[in-house]
Amino acid sequence: MSEADGAVETPAPVLRLLERDSVEVAPLLLGAVVTSCSQEGEVSVRLTEVEAYRGETDPGSHAYRGQTARNAAMFEAAGAVYVYFTYGMHYCVNLVCGPAGLSRAVLLRAGEVVAGQELARSRRVAARQDRDLARGPARLAQALGLSRQDDGARIGPVGSRLCLALPGPGQVDPALVRQGPRTGVSGPGGDAQRFPWRFWLEAE
């Protein structure tokens, strides 16, 4: 059975976090390190910007109108990975939160490559500076080497296709966490008052 088939078990500390509501989870992912492993090697990205989505109650969510073949991974249980294709050329990656069926997720919007820079550079040849390697959701997915083949996979232990290391006490200064409207979300889902669900680390 492949990782995408559910053979991978999400580590307990990570699972306990992801089982919570996506809006609670999102700011707590700032400073976490997501690592992708492949035959090419490993790349690790420290998360500096994320966005929360609340499924069928959220007009900005891919799951707002219910489950489809494209968004099926969003309806899985906490710890699943939802990767979608956008603009005919880019992939973006989300971590699924909460119980199965609620379709809640956090989009990984930006980060800093902290390990595997050489491999990330080979995947992101257009990046002029290392700080641009994972600056934006599509760039982040590209630096990690993720595609639709990873859709439905699970966050696993170290050495898995994807793993997540949560920040320890004191590693993220709460005073640096900022909150605001989601980027590129139009219509009701872009309402800054109702959905201020983008979180980022100031000056990172």
Image (spheres, rainbow, N blue to C red):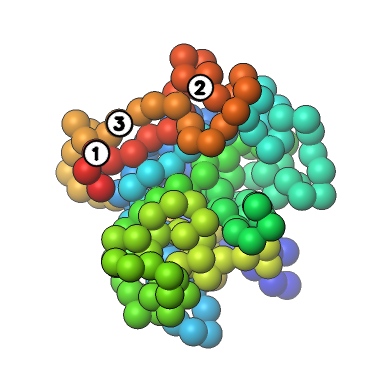
Could you say which disc has been placed on residue 178 in the image?
3
Q: Quadrant of residue 98?
A: top right
User: What element does badge 3 sit on?
Assistant: strand
Q: Label 2: which residue?
A: 195
Labelled pair 3, 1 in contact (Cβ < 8 Å)? yes
Instruction: Give, as a three-letter code, the residue at label 3.
Output: Arg
User: What element does badge 2 sit on?
Assistant: loop
Which numbered disc, 2 or 1, marks the residue that appears first in the sequence? 2
Instruction: Say whether residue 181 is left or right of residue 111.
Output: right
Q: Label 1: which residue?
A: 202
Could you say which disc has been placed on residue 140 in the image?
none
Instruction: Give, as a three-letter code, the residue at label 1.
Output: Glu
Which numbered disc, 3 or 2, marks the residue that appears first in the sequence? 3
Label 3: few (<14), some or many (≥20) within 10 Å? few
> Vertical placement of 31 versus 173: above or below?
below
Instruction: Give, as a three-letter code, the residue at label 2.
Output: Phe
Q: Quadrant of residue 65?
A: top right
User: What element does badge 1 sit on?
Assistant: loop
Label 2: few (<14), some or many (≥20) within 10 Å? many
> Vertical placement of 80 versus 19: above or below?
below
Residue shown at 19% from the left, 38% from the top: 173
